[in-house]
Image (cartoon, rainbow, N blue to C red):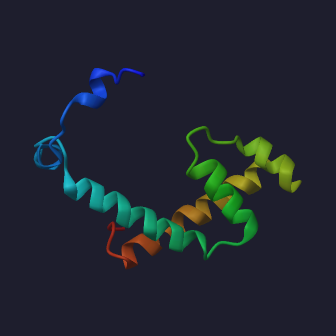
Amino acid sequence: MARKSRYWMKEYSWKATFTDESFDFDKVAFKKTLDEKLYEFSKTLNPRELYIFKNRMRSEAPVTLKNIGIVYEVCRERIREIKVRIDRRLRHFLSKAGICEV
């Protein structure tokens, strides 16, 4: 019979986990709301803008402007212009939603 590790034998108090002072419900709620609003915003973008938004602006390892330009056969300056336009639209969208101020 396999022996259970001590980790699994511990009794956990979920109440203690959620009442811990380091756990901030406001931050979790804000992040959830922000993620929902960003998803709504992404539905307003055309396919090229959506690719730039996901792979350049929301990515942990953003794709370079040059590589995005190669995909769409445009120069990196054009991709930068589209990114600036997306930034402007995103700020407006989030300010209308009450998430941030412009």
Vertical placement of residue 69 versus 102, above or below: above
Rendered residue at 68%/53% (across/down): 80
Position of 58 compared to 21: left or right? right
- Taking depth in this image into account, of 72 and 59 the one nearest to the observer is 59
The reply to whether residue 25 is visible in this rendering is yes
Question: Where's residue 81, x and y in %?
Answer: 68, 58
Percent across and percent down for residue 92 are 45, 73
Compared with 62, 46 (above or below) is below
Q: Nearer the viewer, residue 29 or 16?
A: 16
- Residue at point 30%, 61% (across, down): 30
Residue 57 shown left or right of residue 72 in the figure: left
Quarter of the image for the C terminus: give it: bottom left
Q: Residue furthest right?
A: 73
Of residue 20 and residue 32, the one placed in the foreground of this image is 20
Quarter assignment of residue 87: bottom right
Residue sitting farthest toward the front: 1
Corner quadrant of residue 61: top right
**Quick one: quadrant of the N terminus?**
top left
Residue 64 in the image: above or below residue 93: above
Q: Quadrant of residue 50?
A: bottom right
Residue 72 position in % (x across, y down): 85, 56
